[in-house]
Image (spheres, grey):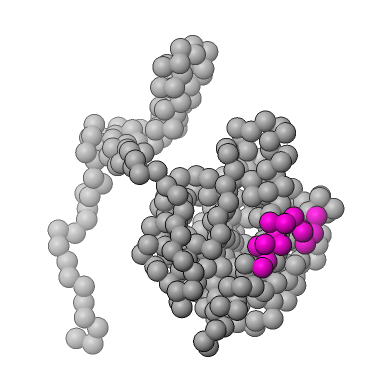
């Protein structure tokens, strides 16, 4: 309907303006809800979820539940909106407690509209038709793996499931990989626009205690907010990225090497060596060797370089025309 998209985009802008002004819908501290998202991120998700609560065809979906903060808060803000959270709890969970905590919070706050999907995000998105039951995703919160490919998969895999007025909130946009993926998605899909972006000066891990407290009340580690804009009402705006793509080229250089899986440990060792930190060098070397041993020789049969992993692929094959 002509004008309907403009009205919706204005409502999204109004919601974000209220968030930016610090008028929080709810104080998560009152319920002792901890998490890794900034207060403004949580508030924005609540306000956006409310925009879809009266739409029986819509739902909320997030990638990366952690301990349930954003899932529970969104479900509380819009009790009539089905809210789904996808996480296999494989990272940031050294004690294996996060799934239990998330489920306990869902029960504690009696958010019957919240559903936890315990799965790898790619597998879950491949079969997302089943839990959605024909609903379209109105608010999509992406807070999963922050590498370029994962971020791009999160955007591409749900595109056909998005509501006509879909709002995509991408967390941790401070990371260049995330911004690059968002930018490339926007360039390839001009019916989507960047409506809002906000960044902080560093990852919370690298902030002082005072800085962290300040940014925990903000967007914490950056956010990009994308909207569907088929009428081209918004001006073109893209997340800022560095023109030097060396880091991304290096991914190919690393992936083809025999010991590619050891890259994180190898870089930590290299850093200790070049900085002359002997104590850290010793620890890093031990971690590198332990990681190698943990691979149980899986890398030993590869070539030193130029591994293509193409053994066993078909020499050539055609697709088949249906109905032939």
Q: Point out residue 77 in the picture as x, y percentages from the top left corner.
A: 75, 67
Count of numbered tags: 0
Q: Nearer the viewer, residue 263 or 205?
A: 205
Q: Is residue 241 visible to us here?
A: yes
Q: Residue at x 49, y 74 (%)?
A: 233
Q: Residue furthest right?
A: 30
| First to last magenta residue range | 14-27
Q: Residue furthest left?
A: 315
Q: Is residue 209 above or below residue 249?
A: above
Q: Residue at x 28, y 37 (%)?
A: 253
Quarter occupied by residue 42: bottom right
Q: Residue at x 46, y 78 (%)?
A: 231
Q: Nearer the viewer, residue 30 or 304?
A: 30
Q: Is residue 71 visible to us here?
A: no
Q: Is residue 20 magenta?
A: yes
Q: Residue at x 26, y 46 (%)?
A: 309
Q: Nearer the viewer, residue 273 or 102?
A: 273
Q: Nearer the viewer, residue 265 or 218?
A: 218
Q: Point out residue 165 in the picture as x, y percentages from the top left corner.
A: 55, 76
Q: Quadrant of the C terminus?
A: bottom left
Give left or right: position of 133 versus 47: left
Q: Is residue 6 magenta?
A: no
Quarter occupied by residue 115: bottom right
Q: Is residue 157 above or below residue 65?
A: below
Give left or right: position of 130 versus 308: right
Q: Point out residue 322 in the picture as x, y percentages from the top left corner.
A: 24, 83
Give left or right: position of 72 versus 287: right
Give left or right: position of 130 versus 307: right
Q: Point out residue 15 in the picture as x, y percentages from the top left corner.
A: 68, 66
């Amino acid at each position: 309907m002509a004008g309907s998209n403009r009205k919706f985009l204005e409502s999204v802008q109004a919601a974000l303006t209220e968030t930016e002004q610090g008028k929080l819908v709810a104080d998560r501290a009152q319920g002792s809800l901890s998490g890794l998202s900034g207060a403004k991120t949580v508030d924005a998700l609540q306000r956006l979820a409310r925009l879809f609560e009266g739409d029986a065809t819509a739902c909320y979906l997030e990638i990366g539940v952690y301990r349930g903060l954003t899932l529970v808060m969104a479900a509380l803000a819009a009790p009539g909106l089905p809210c789904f959270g996808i996480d296999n709890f494989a990272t940031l969970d050294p004690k294996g407690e996060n799934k239990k905590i998330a489920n306990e919070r869902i029960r504690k706050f009696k958010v019957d509209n919240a559903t936890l999907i315990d799965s790898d995000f790619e597998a879950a998105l491949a079969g997302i038709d089943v839990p959605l039951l024909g609903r379209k995703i109105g608010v999509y919160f992406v807070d999963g793996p922050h590498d370029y490919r994962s971020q791009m998969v999160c955007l591409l895999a749900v595109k056909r499931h998005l509501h006509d007025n879909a709002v995509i909130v991408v967390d941790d946009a401070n990371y260049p990989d995330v911004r690059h993926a968002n930018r490339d998605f926007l360039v390839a899909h001009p019916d989507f626009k960047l409506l809002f972006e906000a960044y902080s000066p560093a990852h919370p891990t690298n902030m002082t205690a005072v800085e962290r407290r300040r940014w925990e009340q903000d967007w914490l580690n950056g956010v990009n907010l994308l909207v569907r804009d088929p009428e081209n009402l918004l001006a073109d705006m893209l997340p800022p990225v560095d023109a030097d793509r060396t880091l991304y080229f290096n991914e190919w250089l690393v992936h083809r090497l025999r010991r590619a899986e050891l890259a994180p440990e190898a870089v930590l060792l290299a850093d200790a060596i070049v900085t002359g930190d002997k104590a850290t060098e010793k620890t890093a070397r031990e971690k590198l060797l332990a990681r190698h041993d943990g691979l149980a020789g899986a890398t030993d049969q590869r070539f030193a370089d130029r591994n293509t992993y193409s053994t066993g692929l078909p020499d050539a094959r055609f697709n088949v025309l249906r109905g032939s």
